[in-house]
Amino acid sequence: MAERKVLNKNYPADFDQKKIPRLLKPKNHQKKNRFMLPVPARCNKCGNYMSEGTKFNRRVEQVTEETYLGIEIYRFYFKCTNCSTELTIKTDPRNCGYLLFA
């Protein structure tokens, strides 16, 4: 059992960490995560109503060309549960809320 609980790693003498290539992500990289819908939404294509608190997988990106008093604005992409149309929510720090786009 003791051989499975190794705390130290054995690196070869000629190992150079600088030769390992780094993955560079673009500045406006979209991240994927799971979230709950912050506001009630309705799909413009099929008319499906999605209540507040419905869980979705979303993509998040920072809106680079817009800020409000130095506060970053984010855009969230998710799909309708009925017809899979992509919907967009953008944060609205001026009015302390969200803007929903279809």
Image (tube, rainbow, N blue to C red):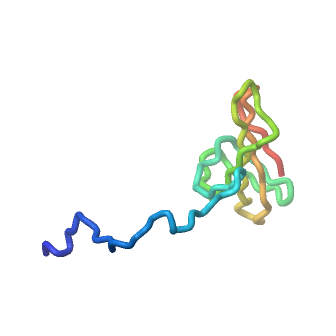
Q: Quadrant of residue 29?
A: bottom right
Q: Residue furthest toward the front?
A: 14
In the image, residue 85 above or below residue 70: below
At horizontal 76% and vertical 32% (from top left) the residue drawn is: 67
At horizontal 73% and vertical 60% (from top left) the residue drawn is: 79
Q: Quadrant of residue 68?
A: top right
Q: Could you tell me residue 100's position as x and y percent?
A: 79, 44
Q: Could you tell me residue 71's position as x and y percent?
A: 69, 30
Q: Residue furthest toward the left?
A: 2
In the image, residue 50 above or below residue 46: above
Q: Could you tell me residue 10's position as x and y percent?
A: 28, 71
Q: Could you tell me residue 46's position as x and y percent?
A: 83, 60
Tell which of 86 and 20 is nearer to you.
20
In the rendered image, the quadrant that contains the N terminus is: bottom left
At horizontal 58% and vertical 55% (from top left) the residue drawn is: 34
In the image, residue 59 above or below residue 101: below
Q: Quadrant of residue 40?
A: top right
Tell which of 58 and 24 is nearer to you.
24
